[in-house]
Amino acid sequence: MTNIPPPAEELRILDHELRQLDARRTQLLARRSWLLGVLRSAEAPAPAWGPARASAQAPAVWSAPAPHPRRPEATAPGVQNVLLVLGGVLLTVAAIAFTLVSWGHLGIAGRAAVLGAVTFAALAAPVPLLKRGLRSTAESVAGLGLVLTVLDAYALHEVALPEVDGTGYAAAASALLAVLWAAYGRSLGALRLPFPAAMATAQLPLLLWVVAVDAGHHTITAALLVTAAFDTVVALSVPVRSVRVVATVGAYGTGAWGLLAAGWLSWEATGPSAATRAAALLALAAAIALGAAWRAPAAQAASGLALTGGLITVAAAGGVLRSVLPDAWTVPGHLLCGVALLAVRGTWLPESVRRGLRWSSAGVQALAVAWALPLVTVVLVGPAGWAERVWSGAPSDARDAVTVSTPWPSNTETAPLVLAAVAAVLALTFRGGPHRSVALSGALGLAWAAVLVLPATLQLPYLAVLLTLGVTTVATLTAAAYSRHAHVSDDGPARQTEPPARPRPSPITLTALGLALLTSLHLAVLSLAAEAATPAVLGSLTALFAAVTAWQKHEIRAVSAAAALAYATALACATGASLDWQPHHIALLVLLVPASAALLAARLKDSTSTLSVEITGAVAALVAIDLAVMEPPVLALVLALCGVIAAGTAVRPDRRQVGYAAAALFVLATWVRLASWEVGSPEAYTLPVTVPALVVGFVRRRRDPGTSSWTAYGPGLSVTLLPSLLAAWGDLDWPRPLLLGSAALLVTLVGARQRLQALLVLGGGTLALVALHELAPYIAQAMGAVPRWAPPALAGLLLLALGATYEQRLQDARRVREVLGRMR
């Protein structure tokens, strides 16, 4: 209600403000002059005598500072608005109180005169106020007049028309008031309040009228939608902003309530007639949304309204189809309506509307796919129960084969049709453009899902589902092999000297390859139901992926080779189990897979394929070891054969590091064999490690004389000397200490001869500890015969001798350290 005052009033306000500023400036200048005088008097020399000195010694009299004017805490327009609003509210309350309480004290003439006079005065007062430029006051008085007209209508019903139905009278009164307020606002064009008030009142007549005539739910819903249509027209055509705001709020409010009511009526419809009436209401709501989208000034709002209108259209048509079709065909019916929305492509509709309709079609299709996903999940996850019921017997049909651990969803017989339809729409819609590869990948996935659930939906025989999955695997693998690669972008002449980048696999290739692997795994799990089917399926999958590995040369080769080896491992296990072999015997058959992987990896030129084959072969070797772990003799053989395979792989120049794994496998095989023979001597376990380690260290020192003796010989000697030393300290017999001492003496002599630090330290230390162990009983016997004072006395003499020759002993120790330091 803030209003700019007339020029004369504004000039008066400005003059008043300038006078206040001048007065304040004069006050500040006077204060400044006084302060300068005080400072000058303080700097001047004091007189020696006379009145001047007396006056100088007199204390200065400080005048009180001028009071600062307080800033107003509220602006003048703000105060004006508060006063006007408060006055209008008080007058309104007084009018209501008079009408409701004091009305009965007056006669008919008095009542009419009072209400008429007050209402006429309130509605006529804005005219002179506007002429004087008091627009805010006029708005406040006009608001009071509008409220008084409502009270007049109420008073008229209570006095003159008490027998008339209140709801019907309210409908007529609200319509009349809306028209009168609009005419009043039009006659006084400077007022802004009557038009939005008339628009707000216009929301009530139609709804109150249908309630007054006891209309049904369909009629009430239609009234809400017609009101929303009226609000939409006003919001899109009237230039007054306040009216557009009220109309927009009314359109969204009444439209939302009407749409919810129409949707509920469509859902509750039990026959074609009720469904058709509800569909007509939904069609009206869709027409309102699409019409608003067509005329909406903002593109984003138009797309959102068109999206809403498209969804409402699908709900309307789908509701009619649902009333005449079985429950299983409800989703396909809605999907058909959603796909029909794509016909707007290339029409004369605005682009924003077409975009919204396309998005609504995509939303319907996404909801249809989401409805079919639980069935796809059941078909994929259900066969996992055969892992606990291997070879328990072939099921009667495909549905029994996939519902081992999960129940079959109801009313999902049309799920394959829904998936296939959405796949076809994707493939036909994106026949070109930048999103073609992604769309075709999605279409391929949906088509695969349709084929996957089709046998169980049709309850085909068990053999038919195996054949269907096998053909699907071949088809998807062929699609992955023949699909094009993604193009690599060219960065310009600056990168022409670099080697050309390898083409990346396209989304179609990756999707087809992933689907092929998933289908083959699903087929392999389903084959576990029958003993005859398992080897046949695993053998076919092994041959299929092996053929792709030998035939194709691009990126899918690594995946197909790994899959072929994995299924070969499963085939070996299934074959052994079918022949009633023991697990450790099956392990020997499984070893054919890592052996084949090692041979295949040596022939492949692609590093990615080589690595995937080697990893799969290593996993197969671990499976063989796990199968033989309960039989130590066979486990030793399996470890030795794995060591042979690893040693053969280490022959290749780029796989020299595998030699360490081969050595470890040979040692483990030896230890397992010794353990199976119940050999408890530690030397039998350590010598097979020491001898190769010393040989390797000797070869390395010959090739690199600068290698330290600790690096070359330290690990090998420690593996044997330390465990044997620990065993010798707990051994009461004499052969082990004698042999260990002899070996330690030999190592020490070789170290002294070759000046090798590791041999000298390890051999000498072991020899000394063995000698100490052998002398320990005699020392203990001698200590028992020696008096107790003898050890302290000997210790004291030793300390005295060391103290007397301390410097010489330090030099000797330093020489020993230098000698050892010069050794390698």
Image: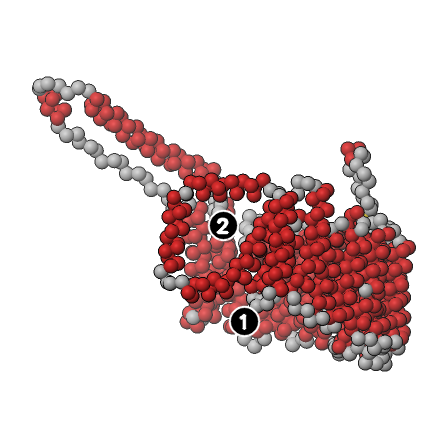
Q: Nearer the viewer, residue 639 or 800?
A: 800
Q: Which residue is mark 2?
A: 1
Task: Please determine whether, in this image, residue 594 is positioned above or below residue 497.
Answer: below
On the image, the x and y values in percent for residue 36 come to 26, 25
Estimate how packed mark 1 is, as few (under 14), some (14 to 19) or many (20 or more) residues with alpha carbons within 10 Å.
some
The spot of residue 340 in percent (x, y) is 82, 62
Q: Is residue 662 left or right of residue 580?
A: left
Q: Residue at x 66, y 54 (%)?
A: 716
122 versus 27 height, above or below: below
Identified by mark 2, the residue type is Met
Q: Amino acid at mark 1?
A: His
**Which one is in front in this view, the residue at disc 2 or the one at disc 1?**
2
Q: Looking at the image, is 407 positioned above or below residue 114?
A: below
In the depicted structure, whether residue 647 falls above or below residue 134: below
Q: Which residue is mark 1?
A: 157
Q: Residue at x 39, y 55 (%)?
A: 794
Answer whether residue 344 is visible to the viewer in this image: no
